[in-house]
Image: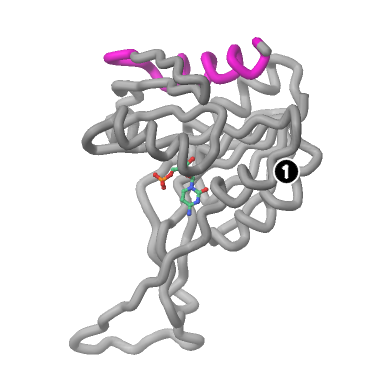
Amino acid sequence: MKILISAGPTREYIDPIRFISNRSTGRMGYLVADYARKAGHEVILVSGPVSIPAPGGVRLVRVETAEEMKKAILLNFPSSDVLVMSAAVGDWKPASPEREKVKRKAEWLLKLVPNPDILKEVAGLKKNGQRVIGFALETEELIRNASKKLLEKNLDLIIADTPAFFGEGGRSRVAFLYRDGRKEEFECMERENVACRIIEIIGGD
Ligand code: C5P
């Protein structure tokens, strides 16, 4: 199968030098890409800026902003069997980024506007046989919030996790919520096992 995977953070520039981003390391998406490749799938990895190397044998598409990520995903989705959207897409971007580097000043009030919800848009384009998988990082009401996103974004599967996955920790409470209402919950799951389970699920249909 052809698997399209997004990973890492996005950067939303406020001037040519400075940007707003998030704590994503890209580890989850890179692991999914690695397992997918080892399972014999063709893999396209659309990645925001991260400091880890890409697994061998995958096609790496580097992007910075949410708009660039959206373009790369829309371009590659029609020929893909599965999309795994594990990127931490910035939900907002500066309303009017400055063209020149802003000089030091006493106060700088930034106005932010929403970025497109890439996953929701792409899930709306889904054809028969294509599957779309998303993630939901939650700090509260893990299952309830993730179930809502599963429905709102029209996904086949959503993986709910917590900020415990940030940095080197690598273990979190995790829930797999399926479109048909099935649910698998794990109190403490390693990132590797999450990636491995996703590839099992993809291969299992
Ligand atoms: O709504 P929330 O941001 O929690 O949804 C998370 C899921 O949606 C993730 O799979 C993420 O990659 C995706 N997403 C997206 N575009 C955004 C925000 C999130 O594709 N602007």
Figure quadrant of the N terminus: top right
In the displayed structure image, the side of residue 173 where residue 123 appears, left or right? right
The residue at 48%/31% (across/down) is: 28
The residue where tag 1 is placed is 77
Say if the magenta span includes residue 195.
yes
Q: Residue 125 in magenta?
A: no
Asked if disc 1 is less than 8 Å from ligand 1, the answer is no
Report the span colored magenta. Answer: 186-204
Q: Quadrant of the C terminus?
A: top right
Who's the residue at 52% across and 14% down the image? 197
Tell me the SS state at disc 1. Answer: helix
Picture residue at 35% right of the left edge, 24% below the top: 170
**Residue 87 pos. (x, y %):** 50, 43
64 over 134 or under it: above or below: below
Q: Amino acid at mark 1?
A: Phe
Q: Where 194 sits versus 100, above or below?
A: above
Q: How packed is label 1: few (under 14 Cα within 10 Å), some, or many (20 or more)?
A: many
Q: Is residue 67 above or below residue 33?
A: below
Where residue 16 appears, x then y in whole percent? 49, 77
**Image location of residue 94, percent across then percent down:** 41, 74
Q: Position of residue 175 (x, y in %)?
A: 37, 21
Name the residue at the right extreme: 79
